[in-house]
Image (cartoon, helix red, strand yellow):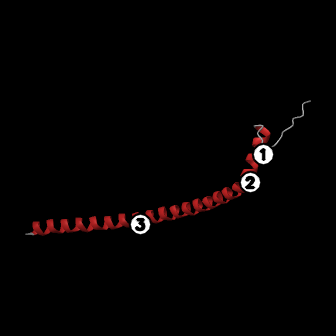
Amino acid sequence: MKKLRLIGNIIFFSLVVHFVLQSVNVFMGKKDMQISLSQTNQQIKELKERKSKLEQEKENAGVNNKDKNEKFARNNLNLKRKGEVIYKIVD
């Protein structure tokens, strides 16, 4: 009878230790997840700021882009508009 009680106590103690260790693992995992969540939120904030800057640059480039393209085409590619006459001065 004492052996049975001793075995029962050992099994009970083992289960208690197992559940305590599992609780500690869950608690530590929760801390890691909170750290990971805060880092992810920071990355999301940075990416949103970058996105807004890029969208603003896109809008600004769209306004001046037509003029820049025309200037590049005239100066580097020797293109002209329909009906224009171009004179070159040769030294």
- For label 3, the residue is 30
Residue at image x 84%, y 39%?
Answer: 86
**Dot 1 alpha-carbon crowd within 10 angstroms: few under 14, some 14 to 19, many 20 or more:** some
- Give the foreground label among 2 and 3: 2
Name the residue type under label 1: Lys
Viewer-nearest residue: 61 or 10:
61
Verify CB contact (< 8 Å) between mark 1 and mark 2.
Answer: no
Quarter of the image holding residue 15?
A: bottom left
**Dot 2 alpha-carbon crowd within 10 angstroms: few under 14, some 14 to 19, many 20 or more:** few
- For label 1, the residue is 71
- For label 2, the residue is 64
Q: Is residue 25 above or below residue 64?
A: below
Question: What residue occupies the far right of the structure in this picture?
Answer: 91
Query: What x and y, as percent, mark residue 52?
Result: 63, 61
Which of marks 3 and 2 precedes in the sequence?
3
Which of marks 2 and 1 precedes in the sequence?
2
Q: CA distance from mark 1 to mark 3?
A: 59 Å
Quarter of the image holding residue 18?
A: bottom left
SS state under label 2: helix
Which of marks 3 and 1 precedes in the sequence?
3
Name the residue type under label 2: Asn
Q: Is residue 30 left or right of residue 53?
A: left
Q: Is residue 82 left or right of residue 12?
A: right
Question: What residue occupies the far front of the structure in this picture?
Answer: 83
